[in-house]
Amino acid sequence: MNAAAFLAEMERDDVLAPSLVHVRRMPARAPRLEPFPEDLPELVVDRLDLAGLRGLYPHQAEALTHLRAERDVVMATGTASGKTLVYNLAFAGDAVHDAKATALYLFPTKALARDQLRQVRDLKLPQIRAAVYDGDTPQAERPVIRKNANLVLTNPDMLHASILPDHQRWGSFFLRLSLVVVDEAHTARGVFGAHVALVLRRLRRLVAHYGGNPRFALASATIGNPEELAERLVGLPFAAVTDDRSPGGEKHFALWNPPLLDQETGDRRSALSEASILMARLADDGIRTIGFVRSRRAAELLAEFARRAVYDAARRDRIASYRAGYLPEDRRRLERQLADGELLAVASTNALELGIDIGSLDAALLVGYPGTRASMWQQAGRAGRREESSLAILVAQDDPLDQYLVNHPADLFDKPPEAAVFDPDNRYILEPHLACAAKEQPLGAAELDAFFGPQAAAAAARLQDAGELVERRGLLYHRGRESPHRRVDIRSASGSTFAIVIDGTGELLGTVDEARAYGQVHPGAVYLHMGEQYVVQELDLVSRVALVKRENPDYYTQSRDVTDIEVVEATEDSITAGGVPTFFGTVRVTNQVVGYVRRLVSSGEVVDLVPLALPPQNLETRAVWWAIPQEVIARAAISAEALPGAAHAAEHAAIGLLPLIATCDRWDVGGVSTALHPDTGTSAIFIYDGYPGGAGISECGFRSVARLLEATLETVKHCPCSHGCPSCVQSPKCGNGNEPLDKSGAVALLGAMLGGSWR
């Protein structure tokens, strides 16, 4: 059975059909080819001919023309649209004409770099000597690569932590550098995007120091601001290629809303359970499937539930999970099995969203909206990559955003993609990168603005005041023997990770960053890894190690925390339609995990609440907040007793809808609501970025405050539940266990904030 026939069968099923709330059918696109450039070396054309390539799609030809004219280019086109071929041809032409030319390819993951190495080698050009240089490259091989390779594939982490600090050994490579590629550039958003931008500025500075002047080629999924993204990342003007003219098979995209189990409570069957049933049925029909989930735990559960539900027992071993945190050898084994067809279905986090070659798949299951339309199309595009028809199913979760989108499909399919958001001027990121730059090569005053932007001079001055930089003869030098590079983890907002180790054997099970460690691997937490359950025995805050023991409890755990927020500075303010002042600025957040609950797996019933004594975590970040005057509360007819629950429910719903207007998901932000906040003198609702210095997310909420509040009100008001549910006001990350919550109060409050009246 093919994917289209499977969907047709679902539509005829009386039990399943009501969950299919919308189906969008996208027609196939016929191929159209343009000839290779006439001056492309004959050897390169011959190799392409052997690979069965007879020409370029129009957007490929356009991008290659830009690069051959020495212009920097960003390609923002869909999955499998041939972006890799463009930059490979650009460097192939360089390498054939000039044996000394070099290129640097940057990928967001190690797995993607190794996958792309195979594609480079498939060209079979002896002039290209390519090698991967990352944390998994043996030490003995690194000098050979530095000496002999003219194409190095790596990641921003390795560039930051190894190549740039050791730039003297790369001086000749930098001098001859003709091309720098940044693949999957749309992943460079939020804090990670700011880090990548500053790593690229440091690279440009050192390459210029050695006399190099490369072109930059960025490849991205379809996003709303490709030129702006590229220019903010690299600091140079870019030409954008966005008209995707690649061929593609017919795609069927279904929106699936799990059935309502209880009209009173609003409970729905879980998206994970629905997806596991769909994955099992697809596997039984021989349809190769990838299921995308939004957490490591969910990846484990989806695979396990699908194995249990599959009818054909022989296919159970052909269903697996894949996620970050697995050891490299485990990930590569799973990638190989998926590409070779040994696996019939895989449940993955977004680790497989990127362009790793995992073979030809027939269907993609998206368990919950992934946070952006760019990610949604990337995940859906992992199926049907070879001009065959394919199926994508978005299974809505029980949260406000998913429920809004399945009821407003035009927002998914007809709206332009979101803009990537990040802030390279964030002082908490800019300052440590300036320290790294000064350590690599003393900084001149002119370099600060030229490479690092208008905020760099003030940041350098703060580093001087702190004694980290010192000026000598007009140059800024880094003080101290310890390298500042070790203090900068570009993947972690907190700058460090915790190792998860099996107690008694010392075996490394995985890692978790510090920002999540207190909530996920606290003492007593149940931790899932490859379908196995472990209970955390100890969390060593000094050694940064969580010791776990293999167990099989009949419960799962959820942490509980308390959060306080203080206004540091309100930098901007506006007035909403209802006369409610809305502010944007800097806040200081104090969060402490104070305990956890144990819930039965079978029913979700709370077994007990266990207190914890973990230290508080402090965060200075950016936030949007509403200072709600008493007259607005009076207009909403909300009593003093009901106000905390109404504000809390409105806060939860607004956080849930924030990804509608910002490139984020609800786990990137936090919130606080209170009946009376000392810094505003009123009732207040805060939404803050969950990263030091901010990530530009709450600012998007501030800029689009009316749309955010209107979508929030509509979602809560039209939710069929009586008293509030996960589809409207309950939050899976609430540290107070979703207490107190008042749905009707939230509707009244939001309506009054928008200028309406209630009751």
Image (cartoon, rainbow, N blue to C red):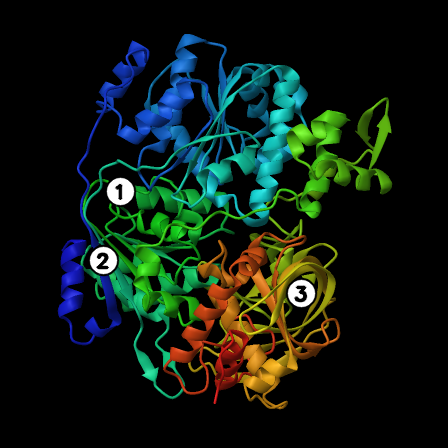
Check disc 1: other Cα within 10 Å, few if <14, some if 14-19, many if 20+. many
Distance from label 1 to label 3 (Cα)? 45 Å
**Residue 264: % across, % down:** 38, 88
Q: Is residue 268 left or right of residue 73?
A: left
What distance separates the C-alpha of mark 2 from that of mark 3? Answer: 50 Å
In this figure, which residue is indicated by the disc labeled 2?
Answer: 24
**Whole-percent x, y for residue 260 in the image:** 32, 80
- Which residue position holds label 1? 385
Residue 302 position, x and y percent, is: 37, 63
Looking at marks 1 and 3 on the same chain, the residue that comes earlier in the sequence is marked by 1
Task: Please state which amino acid type lies under the numbered disc 2.
Answer: Arg
Q: Can residue 120 be spotted in the picture?
A: no
- Tell me the amino acid under the disc marked 3: Glu
Q: What residue sits 49% from the left and 56% below the top?
A: 662
Give the foreground label among 2 and 3. Answer: 2
Q: CA distance from mark 2 to mark 1?
A: 18 Å
Which quadrant holds the N terminus? Answer: bottom left
- Of circles 1 and 3, the one toward us is 1
Point out residue 172 in the picture as x, y percentages from the top left corner.
Answer: 60, 14
Please name the residue that numbered disc 3 is placed on.
Answer: 538
Residue 522's image quarter? bottom right
Q: Earlier in the sequence, mark 2 or mark 3?
A: 2
Helix, strand or loop under label 3:
strand
